[in-house]
Amino acid sequence: MRAFRIFVQKEFFHIMRDRWTTLILLVLPILMIILFGFGITTEIRNTKFAVYDPSGDHTTRAIVNKLESSEYFILERYIKSEDEIEQLFRQGKTGFAVVFGKEQILLVADGTDPNTASILTNYATTLINSYLQESAPTATDAASRAITPEIRLLYNPTLKSAYNIVPGIMGMILMLICALMTSVSIAREKELGTMEVLLVSPMKPYLIILSKIVPYFTISVINYITILLLSVFVLKVPIAGSLVLLSGVSLLFIIVSLLIGIMISSLVDKQIVALLISGMLLMMPAVFLSGLMFPIESMPQVLQWLSHILPVKWFIIAVRNVMIKGLGFSSIIREVLILTGMGIAILIVSVKKFKYRLE
């Protein structure tokens, strides 16, 4: 019993004297509460929508006002022709469109995220029918005026969830293999004291680091190929765009993820700290704040700003544009530049913080 007590005390002392572990144990629960409390929601709010209304009569304007007055929609603009709708979707300026015809209303949603598209169309249908019932003088008129809008889902007409899952899973796996495993591998060498032995060997230090990165880069490329094969032949998700462009973006993301692992290993000396930072502080926000599971627009403004610093968010956007929407390089220039900038910034921090001799 006395030996058990001593071991328990030793473990407490070990945790408390490691400032990184102590910080993670104390701060991580707070971050988790914030993420689960504010980030997880099935409601979709503040979705920008466009309107094509050639008639411009009182009824159509009232319907638009009904949509705009709700918490779910924000009127982005009126368009002059239906041809502008797909252009707005390609540019990412709107996620929903309403087209007024002579005897029907067409609701157009972005089907790359089937859950969001289905929810938005349901919201709009409910609001439109609510207005028609309120404006009808009698119950009979209300029943006769209730409409079932025609719905068109671009890029994913069958509402397959795999269209939304595949880009996110790709980002999660690549991030896991690259950032987590690279940081833990180098931290293990530092913790065991073998890194210093390697650094004083005849081989240059940067070659030693590179030799530890190459296996994880290779594994990540294999995982990328496997994901694509499973997506196309098992999940039936076609590659609508350029395979070369999709592969180039994925390789860029792999490099950025590897650099994140190097940066983590340059800042910490313990495997457990590297594991917690890579597995929790990177993976958890990436799941909840990247737009994979929940729409970013529905989150508090602070969490929306926080999502901008996650490389996986920009990777998912780029993959959806190329793989699902079939767009070209011009549609992902912003994402490529952001990922490149992140990679350069992370590399600079890693070089400045990396210790070529262990203390």
Image: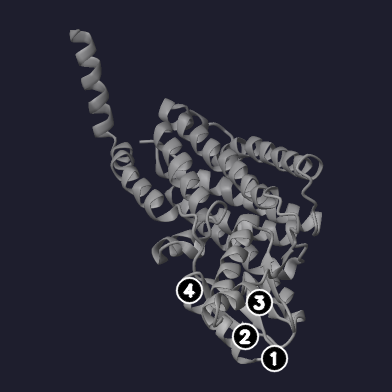
Mark number for residue 55?
A: 1
Q: Kindly identify the amino acid type of the residue bearing the numbered disc 3.
A: Val
Q: Are marks 2 and 1 in contact (CB under 8 Å)?
A: yes
Rendered image quadrant of residue 246: bottom right
The location of residue 337, given as percent across then percent down, is: 62, 66
What element does badge 4 sit on? loop
The vertical placement of 311 against 266, above or below, is below
Mark seen at residue 60: 2
How far apart marks 4 and 1 lie (CA) works out to: 23 Å
On the image, numbered disc 3 is attached to which residue?
Answer: 98
Q: Earlier in the sequence, mark 2 or mark 1?
A: 1
- Mark 2 residue type: Thr
N-terminal of the pair, mark 1 or mark 3, is: 1
Whether label 3 touches label 4, CB < 8 Å: no
Which residue is disc 4 drawn over? 70
Residue at 52% of width from left, 31% of height from top?
198
Q: Say which of 145 and 229 sits in front.
A: 145
Q: Would you identify the image quadrant in which residue 151 lies?
A: bottom right
Kind of element beneath mark 2? helix
Q: Earlier in the sequence, mark 3 or mark 2?
A: 2
**Foreground pick, 237 / 309:** 237
How many numbered marks, from 0 up? 4
Judging depth in this view, the residue of 12 and 299 nearest the camera is 299
Q: Amino acid at mark 1?
A: Ser
Circle 4 or circle 2, nearest the eye: 2
Q: Residue at x 73, y 74 (%)?
A: 86
Q: Is residue 200 visible?
A: no
Which of pointers 4 and 1 lies earlier in the amino acid sequence? 1
Q: Residue 9 at x, y = what percent?
A: 21, 21
Point out the frontmost of discs 3 and 2: 2
